[in-house]
Image: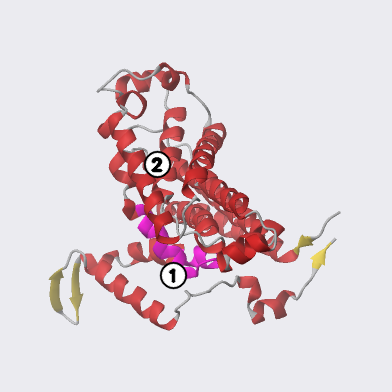
């Protein structure tokens, strides 16, 4: 038998314990926030693989999240509901025939996203740096325009409603745990070392025999697969989607998360998600009426975003490479002392 790292076992056990405690002790509002955090952990970890680990400045996540959301929603909606929802044009026969359960729908969302990424990789990775960012940014706009102008497939600008809410915290949290574990295994594999070589110096990596195009395509399609699944879970959580939901702001949010946590660090992606997604909710009280020492300061809508932005600026001033940089939790000295290098055979 191969070696099973005890750190992974501890991580999985601790995460599962938290899921069980949260699902059985928190109210619906708190569970919804945790669902959102879990979904964004999936998106951030997968986005970090191409942007942080492989070092390709890609701005495509909103496009793949949109694909995953629409594929999952259309797969879960019944034929009768599709006839009821589609108002601009009759639904395509292919859309009517699409009817799957939760797991097949999410897998289909990931596969379709991965296939689109594979097709996109050949022209996209002919360029680098800022040019790559511009090309992938355009992809997100193309998907949005397609969704608006293809009402027989997506119901156009109206979007899709009444999406079955068939998921819960066990599903979103479980898939988030699986995503992080898979990403960490990739990072520590020979493919992960090749990705880091491409990130550090693509020309040098090519000179020592690494097929850089293959490695970038592998990272891109893997990232897209999990972004598609994350998009599907987001559609189930919201139960309604439209093209306007998948603006560039979604990509910008993910970029903030992985930069704050540390480009290339999956631990950083998790912590960044908790701080950004959870933080914006925890500071919501700042938008309402505040009473301090008997003085009514009134309501200040948007104040929480101002405070949150100041906190982000302060953090980035003292942590130029993000909170974790390129390190993982297992790289910290206290964690090494706690677990050492023990492996179970």
Residue at the spot 39% in from the left edge and 81% down from the top edge? 317
Query: In front: 166, or 316?
Result: 316
Q: Is residue 235 left or right of residue 333?
A: left
Residue 115, given in percent of the width and then of the height, sits at 53, 37
Q: Quadrant of residue 202?
A: bottom right
Left or right: 115, with 186 as reference point: left
Q: Can you give x and y, in whole percent of width and height, for residue 223 in the image?
A: 53, 50
Q: Is residue 56 above or below residue 99?
A: below
Which residues are the magenta region?
250-272
Residue extending furthest toward the front = 207
Give the main secondary structure, helix, strand or loop, of the magenta stretch.
helix
Q: What residue did someone put label 2 on?
A: 66
Quadrant for the C terminus in the image: bottom right
Of residue 182 and residue 252, the one placed in the foreground of this image is 252
- The answer to whether 344 appears left or right of 33 in the picture is right
Q: How many marks?
A: 2
């Amino acid at each position: 038998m191969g070696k099973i790292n005890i750190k992974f076992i501890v991580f999985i056990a601790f995460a599962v314990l938290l899921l069980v405690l949260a699902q059985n002790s928190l109210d619906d509002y708190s569970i919804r926030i945790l669902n959102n955090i879990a979904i964004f952990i999936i998106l951030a970890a997968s986005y970090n693989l191409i942007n942080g680990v492989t070092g390709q400045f890609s701005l495509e996540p909103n496009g793949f999240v949109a694909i995953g959301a629409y594929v999952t929603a259309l797969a879960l909606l019944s034929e009768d509901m599709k006839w009821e929802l589609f108002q601009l044009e009759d639904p395509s026969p292919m859309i009517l025939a699409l009817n799957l359960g939760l797991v097949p729908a999410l897998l289909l969302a990931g596969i379709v996203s991965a296939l689109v990424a594979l097709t996109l990789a050949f022209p996209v990775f002919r360029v680098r740096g800022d040019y790559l960012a511009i090309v992938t940014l355009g992809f997100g706009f193309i998907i949005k325009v397609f969704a608006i102008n293809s009402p027989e497939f997506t119901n156009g600008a109206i979007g899709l409603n009444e999406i079955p809410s068939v998921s819960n915290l066990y599903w979103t949290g479980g898939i988030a745990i699986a995503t992080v574990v898979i990403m960490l295994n990739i990072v520590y594999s020979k493919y992960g070392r090749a990705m880091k070589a491409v990130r550090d110096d693509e020309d040098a990596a090519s000179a020592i025999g690494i097929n850089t195009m293959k490695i970038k395509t592998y990272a891109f399609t893997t990232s897209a697969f999990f972004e598609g699944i994350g998009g599907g879970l987001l559609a189930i959580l919201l139960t309604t989607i439209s093209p306007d939901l998948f603006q560039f702001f979604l990509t910008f949010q993910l970029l903030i998360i992985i930069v704050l946590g540390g480009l290339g660090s999956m631990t950083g992606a998790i912590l960044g998600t908790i701080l950004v997604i959870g933080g914006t909710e925890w500071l919501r009280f700042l938008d309402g009426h505040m009473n301090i020492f008997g003085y009514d300061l009134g309501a200040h809508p948007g104040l929480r975003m101002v405070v949150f932005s100041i906190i982000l600026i302060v953090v980035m001033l003292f942590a130029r490479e993000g909170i974790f940089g390129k390190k993982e939790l297992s790289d910290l000295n206290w964690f090494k002392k706690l677990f050492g290098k023990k492996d179970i055979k």
